[in-house]
Image (tube, rainbow, N blue to C red):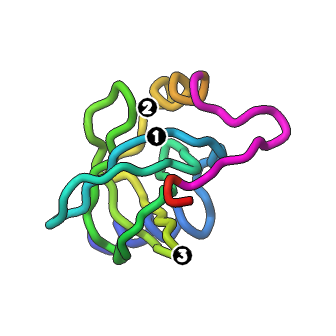
Amino acid sequence: MVALKHGYADAVQEDRCAPRTKLAIPAQLRVSGGGTFRTVVHDLSIAGFSASSIGRLHPEQACWLTLPGLQPIEARVVWWNHSIAGAAFENMLAAEVLDDLLSVWRAPKGGGVTRSCLF
């Protein structure tokens, strides 16, 4: 069963098993063993997200993302690079939940500019 979890994390990172949408959502992130901090989610899919993180995060670290209006969502860190972390949700988001978030937070047509909360 462990191989499946790693396979899922690899698929989320490499194959992008679900399309990710660029956006900028103010949120909160809590990492196992640490406190909660403010972040900006830069892209989101039913399978995972990337977000700003001033502290270094490590692959396989458990984390909980709290998006506006939702309960914390458990995820596992897949990568961290230059203050941006990517994570795979433990359980995929419902398509309806993603659609609701995108209807409010999607970047303007043509891409728009998303800025990290760090700059």
Dots 1, 3 in contact, CB < 8 A: no
Q: Nearer the viewer, mark 2 or mark 3?
A: 3
Q: Residue at x 58, y 30 (%)?
A: 105
- Check the image and name the residue furthest to the right: 110
Amino acid type at mark 3: His
**Total numbered badges shown on the rendered structure:** 3
Amino acid type at mark 2: Ala
Q: Is residue 106 magenta?
A: yes
**Is 44 left or right of 72, judged from the image as shown?**
right
**Is 69 left or right of 33, judged from the image as shown?**
right
Label 2 Cα neighbours within 10 Å, binned few <14 / some 14-19 / many ≥20: few
Which residue in the protein does label 3 denote?
82
Q: Which region is colored magenta?
A: 104-116
- Check the image and name the residue furthest to the left: 33
Quadrant for the C terminus, please: bottom right
Labels 2 and 1: the sequence-earlier one: 1
Q: CA distance from mark 2 to mark 3?
A: 30 Å
Q: Residue at x 33, y 62 (%)?
A: 76
Foreground: 58 or 97? Answer: 58
Residue 94 — which label? 2
